[in-house]
Amino acid sequence: MAFPKSIKQLCMPSRVYFIVSILAILFVLFQNLGNTNRYQIGKFSCRVTNTTLLFIVKIIYVLFWTYVLNLICKDGYPGLSWALILLPFIVFTSIIILFMLLQL
């Protein structure tokens, strides 16, 4: 199965993942304009050898997972695609709530 030529050809879970990921990459890219050896997200930053290479790897990662999610969805498992997208948010939200309840 080839990568879809249009975003509209993606199933909904892979489309949501792709759009949110590209927006996040663009946000971080604008924040890092002019930085070649320092990668910054919000107030946090770290030294890297090359920010351009980092963004290329991020884009390849997003394209790979968009493709995988679309394959899963097209094979008749859209629920699994949604679960793979939402699982990190559910886990992190649960951890934050747990920390708040335990006041750590």
Image (spheres, rainbow, N blue to C red):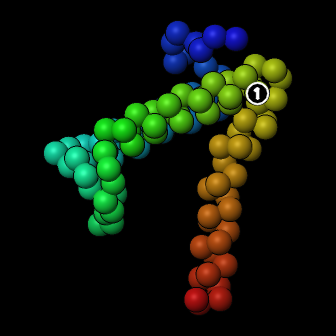
Considering depth in this image, is 103 or 1 the residue closer to the camera?
1
Considering depth in this image, is 14 or 40 the residue closer to the camera?
40
Q: Is residue 1 left or right of residue 47?
A: right
Q: Is residue 90 above or below residue 61?
A: below
Q: Which residue ends up furthest to the front in the rendered image?
A: 49
Q: Which residue ends up furthest to the bottom in the rendered image?
A: 103
Mark 1: secondary structure: helix
Quarter occupied by residue 71: top right
Amino acid type at mark 1: Ile
Residue 12 coordinates in the image, percent (x, y): 63, 27
Residue 101 coordinates in the image, percent (x, y): 65, 85
Counting the numbered discs, the total is 1
Residue ID for mark 1:
72
- Taking the spot 72% from the left edge, 35% from the top edge, the residue there is 81
Considering depth in this image, is 60 or 101 the residue closer to the camera?
60
- How crowded pointer 1 is (Cα within 10 Å; few <14, some 14-19, many 20+) is rated as some
- Taking the spot 63% from the left edge, 24% from the top edge, the residue there is 67
- Taking the spot 39% from the left edge, 43% from the top edge, the residue there is 54
Quarter occupied by residue 8: top right
Quarter occupied by residue 93: bottom right
Q: Is residue 104 above or below residue 26?
A: below
Q: Which residue ends up furthest to the right in the rendered image?
A: 76
Q: Is residue 101 above or below residue 61?
A: below
Q: Is residue 77 left or right of residue 31?
A: right
Q: Quadrant of the N terminus?
A: top right
Q: Is residue 31 visible?
A: no
Considering depth in this image, is 19 or 3 the residue closer to the camera?
3
